[in-house]
Image (cartoon, rainbow, N blue to C red):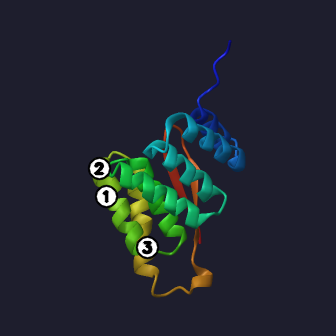
């Protein structure tokens, strides 16, 4: 008898392949296997973000952070969602928290924080239609890169 592969692993592989809807289903399977822990909720939030479901992504990521306020990937991803929603001030605070918890080790979180600070500085000069869109790119093992297309 063969064992099924962990839904989180399958979901991460599907995310890397750009199959976000399938990844979401794999993460739901992981939720059934592991329960709604911070890792599963963060993964669900990331998939929903890639699918453009910002409200659902924000809910998932806030729930992950509530369960584990020190879970840096969930904090970073929540910051990404907030940036996409134009909530630059809150995103800055979330990225600062993630950066502090990570002891400044992640260049990606530092870059995300810098972008949030820059957007706060620029926010008074751009209209909502000119606001840049942010994208989350997985860089392996829970590392994500925030890309801006301004």
Residue tagged 3: 88
Q: What element carries label 3?
A: helix
Mark 1: few/some/many CA within 10 Å (<14, 14-19, 20+):
many
Give the left or right position of residue 21, taking residue 148 as reference.
right
Residue tagged 2: 101
Q: Which residue is drawn at 62% across and 83% down?
A: 129
Instruction: Work out whether 115 lies above or below 13.
Output: below
Q: Residue 22: x and y, percent?
A: 71, 44
Rounded to the nearest whole Å, what is the CA distance between mark 3 and mark 2? 20 Å
Rounded to the nearest whole Å, what is the CA distance between mark 2 and mark 1? 6 Å
Rounded to the nearest whole Å, what is the CA distance between mark 1 and mark 3? 14 Å
* Mark positioned earlier in the residue sequence (3 or 2): 3
Quadrant of the image containing the C terminus: bottom right
Residue tagged 1: 97
Instruction: Work out whether 78 lies above or below 119.
Output: above
Quadrant of the image containing the N terminus: top right
Q: Residue at x 51, y 62 (%)?
A: 58
Q: Residue at x 56, y 50 (%)?
A: 44
Question: Splitting the image into 4 quarters, where does residue 113 fall?
Answer: bottom left
Mark 3: few/some/many CA within 10 Å (<14, 14-19, 20+):
many
Question: Splitting the image into 4 quarters, where does residue 135 fall?
Answer: bottom right
Q: Look at the numbered discs 2 and 1 and tell me whether their residues touch, using CB distance below 8 Å.
A: yes
Q: Which residue is drawn at 29% across and 49% down?
A: 101
Q: Is residue 73 visible?
A: yes
Q: Nearer the viewer, residue 26 or 70?
A: 26
Q: What element carries label 1?
A: helix
Give the left or right position of residue 104, taking residue 133 as reference.
left
């Amino acid at each position: 008898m063969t064992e099924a592969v962990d839904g989180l692993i399958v979901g991460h592989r599907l995310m890397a392949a750009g199959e976000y809807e399938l990844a979401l289903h794999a993460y739901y399977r992981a939720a059934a296997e592991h329960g709604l822990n911070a890792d599963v909720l963060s993964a669900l939030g990331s998939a929903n973000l890639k699918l453009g479901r910002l409200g659902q992504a924000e809910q998932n990521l806030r729930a992950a952070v509530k369960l584990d306020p020190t879970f840096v990937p969930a904090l970073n991803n929540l910051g990404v969602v907030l940036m996409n929603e134009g909530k630059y001030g809150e995103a800055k605070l979330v990225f600062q928290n993630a950066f502090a918890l990570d002891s400044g080790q992640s260049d990606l979180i530092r870059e995300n924080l810098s972008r949030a600070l820059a957007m706060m500085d620029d926010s008074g000069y751009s209209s909502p239609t000119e606001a840049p869109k942010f994208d989350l790119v997985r860089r392996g093992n829970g590392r994500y890169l925030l890309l801006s297309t301004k």
